[in-house]
Image (spheres, rainbow, N blue to C red):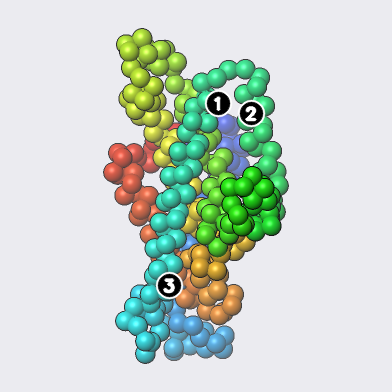
Amino acid sequence: MPSFLREFFKRNGTGMGSLMLGLVLFWTIGLIILPQLSMLDFSFRPNLPPPEIGGPRDVYTLENYKYLIYGPEGGSQDYNAVDLRVFFRTLVAAVCVTVFNLILCYPIAYYLAQTKGNHIRIFALMLIIPYWINEILRAFALRIIFGETGVLNNMLVGLGIFDTPFDFIRNDIALYAGLGYAYILLMIFPIYNVIESLDRNQIEAARDMGASWAKIHQRVVIPYAKPGISSGCTMVFMLSAGALAAPQILGGPSSLWFTQLIYQQFNDNSDWPQGAAYAVVLLVTCILLVLAVMRLFKVNMGDIGK
């Protein structure tokens, strides 16, 4: 038995250790790895009627992946411009949501971690309580707020800032705000957990040496908080790129999300192989982007797991 397993069972006991290990393996293998392998297998299959599945025509093919790039055979365009445009727009939007959340959440996380007192607990509770409400209901609430006759437009028109209501839905402002709001806690708490363990004496020493607040954060806080920042950015980016409810509810007519194309292939077109291929492309692309950014900023998986 490997040494880390012996230490694990010694610390948790044989019964509890076996239960915890079994649950982790079930979660990892049964609920993550096997479904993804099944999805990968589907992506290489042709879309056949049920009686022909497993027959001579049911062979592996790359047609589902070619469709994303070239579109249907005999189409009017050389490339599948619509789907590719939606794909890249989804990735760019997910990056923008991640950067927006980082800029918004870093000061909040720093304030929570470096300030003591009961009011901080109240502040943290105020952040958590809205998430007791279902994500779908929160998305519809945001649609009411950002609608043409919603609270925000009524306030802006009433103050004389706009003469007529502004269409936040059609201009995707409601969608980006909804995505940022949906995953804000996933950015705050990883950064908060890391900064909380930072020795305040390091900050005080930097201030005594005449460093500005910008320099303190650049040289002391941000390098120390890099694991939390990486973890938060990874979760927000992956979940934003894979979001479905928010784009469906808050998106305008021209803000089609790539996950909506996947949904259409699975449910509207009943083309599971094509939907699986789109899902695999999105997953692999997101993973490669995350790994590339981690390499760029010299962050490893061990840092994220801390």
Element type at marker 2? helix
**Classed neighbour count for the residue bearing mark 2: other residues with Cα under 10 Å, few (<14), some (14–19), many (≥20):** few
Amino acid type indicated by mark 2 = Phe
Vertical arrangement, residue 251 with respect to residue 298, above or below: below
Across and down, in percent, residue 85 comes to: 40, 68
Q: Which mark is residue 226?
A: none
Q: Considering depth in this image, is 43 or 248 the residue closer to the camera?
A: 248
Q: Earlier in the sequence, mark 2 or mark 3?
A: 3
Residue 184 visible from this viewpoint: yes
Amino acid type indicated by mark 3 = Asp
Mark 2 to mark 3 CA distance (whole Å): 43 Å
Q: Tell me what residue is drawn at x 45 percent, y 38 percent.
A: 103
Q: Which mark is residue 123?
A: 2
Q: Considering depth in this image, is 301 or 241 the residue closer to the camera?
A: 241
Q: Which quadrant, please, contains the C terminus?
A: top left
Mark 1 to mark 3 CA distance (whole Å): 42 Å
**Classed neighbour count for the residue bearing mark 1: other residues with Cα under 10 Å, few (<14), some (14–19), many (≥20):** many
Q: Disc 1 designates what residue?
A: 112
Q: Earlier in the sequence, mark 1 or mark 2?
A: 1
Across and down, in percent, residue 216 comes to: 36, 22
Across and down, in percent, residue 278 comes to: 45, 69
Vertical arrangement, residue 114 with respect to residue 39, above or below: above
Q: Which mark is residue 83?
A: 3
Vertical arrangement, residue 188 with respect to residue 238, above or below: above
